[in-house]
Amino acid sequence: MNRQRAVRQMLEDLRSAGVTHVPADFARELATALQTAPAEKRTAPVAPTPAAKPSLAPAPRTQPVVSTAPAVVTPAPAPSASPAAPTVARSAPVAPAASLFEKPAAIPAAPARPCLNLTRDERVAQLKDVAARVAQCTRCEELARTRHQTVFGVGNPEAEIMFIGEAPGADEDRQGEPFVGAAGQLLNKIITASKLTREEIYICNILRCRPPGNRTPAPDEAANCREYLDAQIATINPKYIVCWGSVAAQNLLNITSSIGKLRGKFFDYQGIKVMCTYHPSYLLRTPTAKKDVWEDMKFFRRAQGVELQ
Ligand code: URA
């Protein structure tokens, strides 16, 4: 038996033994042997096979190719998996080099955030605990010095919908509750028109203290207060959040786009659907924007299966 026939025989033996692929070095050696062997009349033609994988292509040819024999063993039907076999998909056996790019078996998706599944009483207790810490907070020296009281949040501890505003104003600072001033009155109208009630929502702000003169919250103030907001979100575990105004939207989502660009779609925040729209205070200054907020609320409520006219 000459060299080429011996190689062919070896390939046949491997194939009938169920070997579906061989180490790259070995395949290359076989391919070279087939090319460099003297031509011979084929007595036992090898079955036609698909083109060799590029990574197993034979070394540059210096002699005319004599045979179309493959560089890799033709994949035999996949043997039935033994109990010890790995669970990686085997429908298309791949050459060793390609296996580097094989996708791992499916990895179960990690939950977006821990699902607390707290009872109502546990939520109430947890919120009370955080509110007590907020009441003592002095992280923002100026705000702690100038506030009458902190404004933590209000509403249903089991709410599916959470509203986030910017910061307490003068009325909220005096009464200790979010959205009770002029902007709050308009928000109440929006809530009612949207077939919602304040009692089924949870409402809070990016800040829990009033910035003097109602100035825009500074980034470090928002950062100082974030722990409390995160605790409220984690406790309430809402399905939906509405961000009222750019301060709420940009801080929650950690983005810089204008509110005009953020409207009209849902963002995903840790598995919560977030919609952003104009702040009621902006609507008081710019009544023409009310129709946009109405469109946003129609879009928002449609997601909950409620059609608004
Ligand atoms: N504006 C806000 O953003 N929040 C309030 O609580 C009141 C006015």
Image (tube, rainbow, N blue to C red):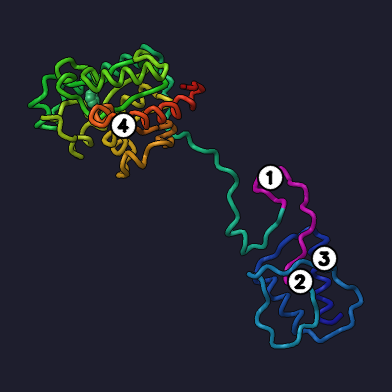
Q: How many labels does the image show?
A: 4
- Disc number for residue 288: 4
Q: Give the range drawn in magenta.
A: 71-91
Q: How many residues crowd mark 1 within 10 Å: few (<14), some (14–19), many (20+)?
A: few
> How would you classify the magenta stretch by its main secondary structure?
loop
Sooner in the amino-acid sequence: mark 3 or mark 2: 3
**Residue depicted at x 20% and y 34%:** 224
Q: How many residues crowd mark 2 within 10 Å: few (<14), some (14–19), many (20+)?
A: many
Q: How many residues crowd mark 3 within 10 Å: few (<14), some (14–19), many (20+)?
A: few
Task: Give the label, 3 or 2, closer to the camera.
Answer: 2
Element carrying mark 4: helix
Q: Residue 153, image x and y in percent?
A: 27, 20
- Disc number for residue 84: 1
Task: Give the label, 2 or 1, closer to the camera.
Answer: 2
Instruction: Quickly name the residue at label 3.
Output: 13
Q: Quadrant of ligand 1?
A: top left
Task: Give the label, 4 or 1, closer to the camera.
Answer: 4
CB-based contact (under 8 Å), mark 3 and mark 1 = no
Q: Does the residue tagged 2 have its C-beta within 8 Å of any atom of ligand 1?
A: no
Sooner in the amino-acid sequence: mark 4 or mark 3: 3
Magenta run includes residue 85: yes
**Which amino acid type corresponds to the residue marked 1 in the rendered image?**
Ala
Q: Residue 48, image x and y in percent?
A: 83, 68
